[in-house]
Amino acid sequence: MGHGAVFFGSDSLPVISSFRKYYDAQGFVVGSVNATEHSVMCAGTKDDELGTFRTLMNTYPKGILSVVSDTWDLWKVLTVYLPELKEEVLSRDGKLVIRPDSGDPVDIICGENRALGGETPKDKGVVELLWDIFGGTINAQGFKVLDTHIGAIYGDSITTERAENICMRLSEKGFASTNVVLGIGSFTYQFNTRDTFGFAMKATSVVVKGQRREIFKDPITDDGMKKSAKGLIKMDLVNNEYVLIDEVTPEEEHEGALKVIYEDGKFINKISLDEIRTRINGCI
C-alpha cells in the first residue's frame, strides 16, 4: 500500500481492495499490463515456447504485452525465436516487451561486454540484441531508441545503484535509457529493514492501574541510535520541519501536530488515498 500511494503500477491485487476499504479510494487505484509469468510459459511447454509467444500475441493483438522470457533459455528467445517472429511483432498494434527475470540485471540488460558489438549474446545483452533484430531510430540526443513495437523490462531486484549502472552502461553503448523499464519488486523492498531509514515505532507511554507511566528504551550495547522517545509526545512544525518534543503534559500533547488516526479498532480523522497522493506530489 505504501508503494501504491506513490506509484500507479502494481500487480498486487489486495492493494486495490485495501485502499478502497481503508482509504476511500475510488475508481482506478493501481494496475498493470497484460503480462505472463513462468507458469504460463511452462504450460506452453519448453518444446513449443515459440508457439506460446504466437498464441499470446494472437490473444492480445493490441497494447503492451510483457512476456517473461528466461523460463528456459533467454538467449535462444533473443537469437532464434524473435528473429522468426519479427514480422509478426512489427505488424502488431502494440509493444511486445521482453522480460528477463534472473541473473545480474545490469549484465542481462546491457551485456557483459561494455563495448558495442560483442561477439556472444551474453556480451551484447537484451537491448543490443533487440536492436540487431528490430532496429529503431536515433533520438535528438543521438541515442538509439528501439522500434516502438519492441521493448524490455527487468521487473524485479532493481536498486538505485543498479538502475544508475544500467542507464550508464546503456549510454556508453549509445542506447537511450528509455529502451528498458525497471521494476522494484520484492527483492528491493524486502532488502530494506526498519534500520535502513532509522525508522521504528515504539510505545512511549502506558497506563498501569489508572496511573500514566513514561516508558523508553536505551540499550547499553547500542550506539545511541535505538534510544527512544519518552512519555507523551508533541510534534511542532518549526521552519517547515517537524520537531519532536517528549515528556510533555497531556495538555501539551493535544496542542501538537499529531492527530489520533486509529483508536479502539476504528478510524478517526480518516484520510483518503487522493489526499495522500496529493500530499506526496506536493513534496516532490
Image: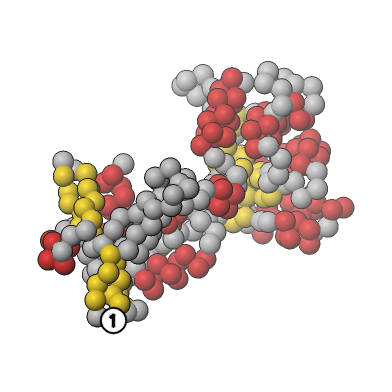
Q: Is residue 256 left or right of residue 158?
A: left
**As shown in the figure, which amino acid type bears the numbered disc 1?**
Lys
The image quadrant of residue 230 is bottom left
Would you place residue 250 above or below residue 198 in this image?
A: below
**Which residue is the extreme one toward the front?**
220
Q: Residue, x 76% and y 41% (percent of image)?
A: 74
Q: Quadrant of the C terminus?
A: top left
Estimate the x, y position of residue 158 in percent, counting from the top left.
57, 41
- Which residue, given by chain and number where applicable, does mark 1 sit on? 209
Estimate the x, y position of residue 253 in percent, counting from the top left.
17, 63
Q: Residues within 10 Å of mark 1 (few under 14, many from 20)?
A: few
Estimate the x, y position of residue 42 in percent, counting from the top left.
79, 58
Would you place residue 12 above or below residue 283 in this image?
A: below
Residue 155 appears in the rendering: no
Q: Nearer the viewer, residue 265 or 184?
A: 265
Q: Nearer the viewer, residue 42 or 62?
A: 42
Q: Residue, x 68% and y 56% (percent of image)?
A: 37
Would you place residue 167 above or below residue 242 in this image?
A: above
Q: Nearer the viewer, residue 264 or 120?
A: 264
Q: What sort of colour scheme is used for the picture?
A: secondary structure
Q: Residue, x 60% and y 44% (percent of image)?
A: 157
Estimate the x, y position of residue 48 in percent, counting from the top left.
84, 53
The image quadrant of residue 1 is bottom left
Q: How many marks?
A: 1
**Label 1 secondary element:** loop
Q: Nearer the viewer, residue 34 or 211?
A: 211
Q: Residue, x 12% and y 66% (percent of image)?
A: 251
